[in-house]
Image: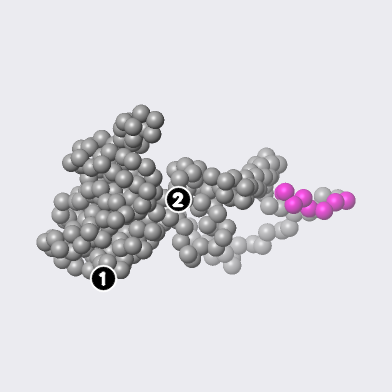
Amino acid sequence: MKVIDLSPLQNNLNPIQKLIAQIQGVSRFGYDWIGDLKVQADIIELTKNLLDSHYTMLRYVTLESLEIPIPLILIGPAGICVVYTSGVKGIFQAKNESWAEMNRSTQKYEPKRNNLINRTQLMMRAVDAFLTRRKQPHPPLQAAIIFPNPGTHVDAVRPAVRIVLSDGIERFVGSLVQSKPVLNPNEAASIIETLTQGRMPVEKPAEPKAERHDVFDLRELPAEKPKPRPAGGKASPVGKLKINRNQWVFLGVMAALEVIVIIIAIVFFIFILPSL
């Protein structure tokens, strides 16, 4: 299986770039964001040797009009499958479009505010709408939620999306391989290219060309006479760079904020994150 990694934390980034990407991801998606990326990587490792080169896994696909990146999209002869990944642990119930967790005290299922089934369906519809807007032919999409944590149990009652537990990943992949092909290699390649582009192209309006009534040769212009320096002093660097005092103050504040952000990030990853 081929893997196209579009996630912000890639191996070719230097430590500072990775740190900045981690800060941005945590601030946008919460503290579980880094753990979610690890779950994605674990699932890729579990499936990449079970599928041949006819299948491609897109990781961390970001589309317009969708704030949350799509963890995984599997594309191959069996079609397109939007895969949501979760590292949660516990006992859950997936019934139609509802998602609930068992309360340990009452031993009863209670609806979860974070409905993984609805979220996965939203991602599937977003991919379908994106391909449709791009006028990209594609078969009906599939959706699945994979839980690689062995400590997760899901009581599935006709769920709206496919539920795959840790011991069922191989069966899930096998069912894809044995299903009837609906995409040929050229169609799959076209869909992959469309999805990896991510966002709709924005055409910049052509800038109107200024009308020129005269054309001058710079060599024919008289040399500008240097302005005399103020008596008894050196030329002001502020005047030389044409930056006023307010702009210098703004640049100083921005530099101080960057230093504060870096210090907070270092404290977070050294002292707070290991204790979570």
- Residue ranking furthest to the right: 232
Asked whether 236 falls inside the magenta stretch, the response is: yes
Q: Which residue is drawn at 23% across and 57% down?
A: 172
Q: CB under 8 Å between callouts 2 and 1?
A: no
The secondary structure that dominates the magenta segment is loop
Between disc 2 and disc 1, whose residue precedes?
Answer: 2
Q: Which residue is drawn at 56% across and 60% down?
A: 15
Amino acid at the residue labelled 2? Gly
| Magenta span of residues | 232-239
- Residue ranking furthest to the top: 106
Amino acid at the residue labelled 1? Ser
- Residue 154 is drawn in which quadrant? top left
Disc 1, SS: loop
**Residue 256 relative to residue 32: left or right:** right
Locate residue 252, reporting x and y percent: 68, 45
The answer to whether residue 194 shows anywhere in this view is no
Disc 2, SS: helix
Locate residue 192, reporting x and y percent: 27, 61
- Residue 180 is drawn in which quadrant? bottom left
> Crowdedness of circle 2 by 10 Å Cα count: few (<14), some, many (20+)?
few
Mark seen at residue 35 = 2
Q: In front of the other: label 2 or label 1? A: 2
76 and 151: which is toward the camera = 151
Q: Quarter holding the C terminus? A: top right
- Vertical side of 214 occupied by 123: above or below: above
Q: Name the residue under label 1.
A: 53
Locate residue 141, reporting x and y percent: 19, 51
